[in-house]
Image (cartoon, helix red, strand yellow):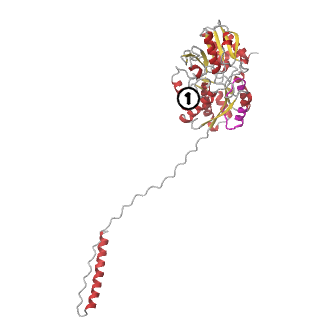
Amino acid sequence: MRSSTTRLLAILLALALAVAACGNDDDSQDTAEAPAEAPTAAPAEEPQEAPAEEPEEPPAEAPAEEAPAPDPVKIGLIAQEEELLAFPEVRAASQAFVDYFNAELDGADGAPIDLVVCGAGDTPESHVACAQQFVNDDDMKIAISAGFGPNSASASDTLAQGGVPTITLGNDFVDYLTPGVFNFDPGLPGLAQVFFVYASGVRGDTSGTLFIADDPAFEPFIPALQAIAEANGIALNEVVPLGFEPDLTGPVSAANPDNDMWFFLLADGAQCTASAAAVETVGFEGNLYANDLCMSEDVVSTGALDGWIGAIVSSAPTADGGEDVALINRVLDQYGSDDAQNAGLAGWALANMYVARDVLIEAGLADATRESVLEALSTYASSDIPGLSGVSCPGPSAWTGACNMAPLVVTVANGLLTSPDGFIQLDFSELDFLLEG
């Protein structure tokens, strides 16, 4: 920059001298011209260093194509959540654990899980309609039916005929005998067997009263319950139907207080609360037993059932259950809705979510077919389901749909479920006599 300015000044000086010379000629012709000074030579320009060339950046690599996201896999759930017999905890616990799988366990081996729920009432027709919806959905490779009594049998029959592998809430005996239908739950017959094995072998009971919900769905089980009790050395010498009024003191007080045990087979928590109040009024001092529908979280937490005994689906959390219970409670608290209690049928629901996920992975996920899912379900075995001591299929003898498991016998203490007696292995082959004739 400096050398360019010097050269410019030299040129301007030369021009100025030339102009001056012309002016002198005009003033006097006689004056001799002064020799013009030679223009000062511009200093030589200093050599400039060529600017350093910046290294060329390598051409940007084209972004790698992301692998396509895996297709979601579906689990169908028929939830009985309307009318008198309703189990809202089933949908709530199922959804909580599916959300947990997707958020923390990468879904099902990377494939997101889509829980498709069909709400049903307390009629076989509504369950059949849900079952047909799943049959018509070609992407539905497995279905879980949470119907009670004849509702489960009706849905299972529709699903089985449509070729959809099914897990059901085992109520009716047909649920254990229908090809393509499986139970990871003891159901009413299985729970009765566990009840009476425990009552006779551990508590020494030999006589009992059966209190049963006055509902047509329960009535067909009375002869089977009496037969199972008798096979285990217990005489159910009276049956007392209980209605749904808030004060059940009358019918409960009419029962025989000399029996060793009173066994309450009830429909829901409200009926259980009324029964517990009546027992307290009467002052029965024998052993008190109840089914899992009676031992809902809301009822247990009141302390009304303190001292009562129940046989429940093994994955229902207890106060002394360790890491499994901590996981179950965390998932229900973190991902569950207000209905996601940890009692009632919630344990059954969460166990079935684990089973369905495992089976879909084994069957090939997006490549699974109903046939491959059925094959995986037919030979399923696991000891990794929280709260379960282990399950395996198929069941013994003719009970191929009654997968082997061990229900949990619990005692209510200080408003909490405890498990001092632990798991009781269920052997369905001991119920073969029910199929004779």
Residue 198 in view: no
Q: Name the side, left or right, on which 32 lies relative to 120.
A: left
Whole-percent x and y of residue 392? 62, 24
| Up-down relation of residue 84 to residue 307 (above or below) | below
> Foreground: 169 or 209?
209
**Picture quarter with the C terminus:** top right
Whole-percent x and y of residue 6? 29, 73
> Foreground: 369 or 88?
88
Residue 150 in view: yes
> Foreground: 336 or 43?
336
Q: Please tell me which residue is depicted at 61% across the width and 39% down the height of the picture.
A: 72
Dot 1: element: helix
> Foreground: 224 or 210?
210
Q: Amino acid at mark 1?
A: Leu
Question: Can you identify the residue that label 1 sits on?
Answer: 332
Q: Please tell me which residue is depicted at 53% across the width and 34% down the height of the picture.
A: 104
| Up-down relation of residue 62 to residue 405 (above or below) | below
In the rendered image, the residue lying farthest to the right is 437
**How many marks on residues?**
1
In the rendered image, the residue lying farthest to the top is 258
| Quadrant housing residue 225 | top right
Tell me which segment is drawn in magenta.
129-152
In the rendered image, the residue lying farthest to the bottom is 30
**Picture quarter with the N terminus:** bottom left
| Quadrant housing residue 2 | bottom left
Whole-percent x and y of residue 141? 67, 34
- Crowding at dot 1, Cα within 10 Å, few <14 / some 14-19 / many 20+, comes out as many
Whole-percent x and y of residue 385? 57, 26
| Quadrant housing residue 44 | bottom left
Is residue 365 located in the magenta-colored stretch of the structure? no
